[in-house]
Image (cartoon, helix red, strand yellow):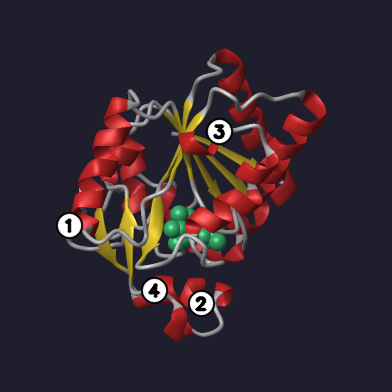
């Protein structure tokens, strides 16, 4: 794992954007694995700017998002489909038919999960995967536990995650209790991974990423086994 500390959140976003731009220039029909949460917002703003000012072309790009709350309507303002449309897809020249987010209102979420993994396989796998990190070390919505799931599945969200995400909802009671998330295999088979961690509240989990331990109790530590991970964090997350 390559580890880089930037001074500020803006620098982390710019550094990450450079990697995405380089990826699209090298392979205009890349399959990008995308993430939600507040951390990638700066990167998405940079990519929109690169599209508007530098002509960065998304016309041949396919995107596959990590996860979605369950159950949730795609039109709900806190759904990850809504988030992606509002914060990225509506501002770039991507064909929305080529943007995939798990269906938060699937009648059969287990079947949706199987179909999601099959889609990723059909697309030829993910070229570049973006990840944020939960305060408890979750990636996607793969929550800490005695064991993790390899495949896309329905996850029960921990209280810690629901509390952390409650800031986006009117109250904690409105935060969904479940999510459909890509599993650890879906993440670890991406050819290249960029992991972002910003802000003081990520300090403890950043420290756990910097020793040699791998544990399912901190799912992000499994990334230490991947051959091509760039871990970008800001000073606040690094120093606490
Ligand atoms: C959510 C998402 C994760 C994300 C995490 C951190 O739980 N499922 O993919 O990494 O939040 O969010 P933030 O960047 O807002 O700290």
Q: Residue furthest right?
A: 53
Q: Using the numbered discs, state the Cα–Cα distance from disc 4 to disc 3 in whole angstroms.
A: 29 Å
For marks 2 and 1, the one nearer the N-term is 1
User: Compared to 167, does 79 lie above or below?
Assistant: above
Q: Nearer the viewer, mark 2 or mark 1?
A: 2
Element marked by disc 3: loop
Q: Nearer the viewer, mark 1 or mark 4?
A: 4
User: Compared to 27, does 196 lie above or below?
Assistant: below
Q: Residue furthest top?
A: 26
Residue contact at pointers 3 and 2, CB within 8 angstroms: no
- Give residue 166's mark: 2
Residue drawn 56% across the image and 18% down it: 28
Residue drawn 39% across the image and 74% down it: 176
Most foreground residue, 231 or 153 = 153
Residue 147 appears left or right of 157:
left
For marks 3 and 2, the one nearer the N-term is 3
According to the picture, the residue beneath numbered tag 1 turns out to be 147
């Amino acid at each position: 794992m390559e580890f880089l500390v930037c001074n500020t959140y803006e620098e982390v976003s710019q550094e990450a954007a450079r990697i995405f731009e380089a990826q699209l220039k090298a392979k205009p029909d890349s399959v990008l694995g995308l993430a939600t949460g507040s951390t990638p917002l700066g990167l998405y703003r940079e990519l929109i700017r690169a599209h508007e000012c530098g002509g960065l072309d998304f016309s041949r790009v396919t995107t596959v998002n990590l996860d979605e709350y369950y159950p949730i309507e795609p039109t709900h303002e806190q759904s990850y489909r809504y988030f992606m449309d509002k914060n990225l897809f509506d501002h770039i020249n991507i064909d929305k038919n080529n943007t995939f987010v798990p269906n938060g209102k699937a009648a059969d979420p287990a079947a949706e999960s199987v179909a999601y993994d099959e889609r990723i396989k059909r697309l030829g796998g993910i070229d570049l995967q973006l990840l944020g990190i939960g305060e408890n070390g979750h990636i996607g919505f793969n929550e800490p536990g005695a064991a993790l799931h390899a495949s896309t599945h329905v996850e029960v969200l921990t209280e810690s995650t629901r509390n952390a995400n409650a800031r986006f909802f009117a109250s904690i009671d409105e935060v969904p209790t479940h999510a459909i998330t890509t599993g650890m295999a879906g993440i670890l088979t991406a050819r290249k991974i960029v992991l972002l961690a910003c802000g003081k509240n990520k300090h403890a989990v950043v420290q756990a990423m910097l020793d040699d331990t791998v544990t399912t109790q901190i799912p992000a530590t499994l990334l230490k086994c991947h051959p091509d991970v760039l871990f970008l964090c800001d000073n606040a997350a690094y120093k606490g």
